[in-house]
Amino acid sequence: MQDLEEKEGRVAAPGLGGAMPVGTVSAKKPAKRIFGVRASTLFLICYIAAFLGWWVENLFRTFTAGVFDSRHQLLPFLGAYGFGIFVMFFVFGTPSEMRIFKKRILPERTAKNHILRSVVYCAVMFCLILFGEMGMGLLFEKVFGVKAWNYTNIPLHITQYTSLPTTIAFTAGIFLLMQFAFPHAVKLIDKIPDKTAFILALVLGILIAADWLLMIISGLINGKFPDYWAIKFR
């Protein structure tokens, strides 16, 4: 009987009234993946980018305006940076493996194609950042009457919401992040157990989304985004 059960892929389960399929007890549902990357890992990387974005903006403002502040958030996360990383990976992948969704760009693995993919990737990023920043700034001004940031003190600015130097800097930063840091971050965060990574991604996602929603609601009601705290150096 035991031999028959093992042949059929079944083992006796004490106390359960008979046999059940092998693996039923210990089977583990695979984690959801987005273009080969575990979803919880990708979201955690996006939250790290949002955290780094908060620091980048504040350090930039500290040197240019002498102000280090909350950036209208209760938590030190700027969701736009995390969302940007998610969109870049979801739509375009990484520079060395550039694609448009599932369609690989210049798929033949040659040195020339590697360089061309990097150039195309940077060009796409440059345009997205330039028009994305400008569009978002004008949208906030139109909908909320809020001028969320001002680049007019930077040479070669285009409206007050974007400039060529900042766009070039953001493009270079994202290229380096996606080409070199992203793959290593995936390997590192993948070491976190699935359940733990899922809970971390869910909790942080809810908190960051709630913080952003609070900012938007405050803008709609008060006509300005909240300024929770600020440290002025000038």
Image (cartoon, rainbow, N blue to C red):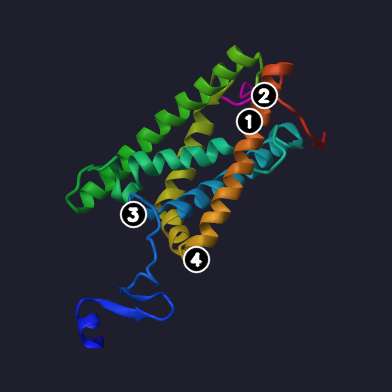
Q: Nearer the viewer, residue 96 or 31?
A: 31
Residue marked by disc 1: 213
Which residues, given as a range, are shown in magenta? 149-156
Q: Residue at x 29, y 50 (%)?
A: 97
Do callouts 2 and 1 mark residues in contact (Cβ within 8 Å)? Answer: yes
Crowding at dot 4, Cα within 10 Å, few <14 / some 14-19 / many 20+, comes out as few
Q: Quadrant of residue 5?
A: bottom left
Crowding at dot 2, Cα within 10 Å, few <14 / some 14-19 / many 20+, comes out as some
Residue marked by disc 3: 36
Give whichever of discs 1 and 4 has the lower sequence position: 4
Which three-letter amino acid code belongs to the residue tagged 4?
Pro
Say what secondary structure mark 4 lies in. Answer: loop
Q: Quadrant of residue 74?
A: top right
Q: Nearer the viewer, residue 40 or 110?
A: 40
Q: CA distance from mark 4 to mark 3?
A: 17 Å
Residue marked by disc 4: 193
Say what secondary structure mark 3 lies in. Answer: loop
**What is the chief secondary structure element of the magenta stretch?**
loop
Residue marked by disc 2: 217
Which three-letter amino acid code belongs to the residue tagged 2?
Ile
Do callouts 1 and 4 mark residues in contact (Cβ within 8 Å)? Answer: no
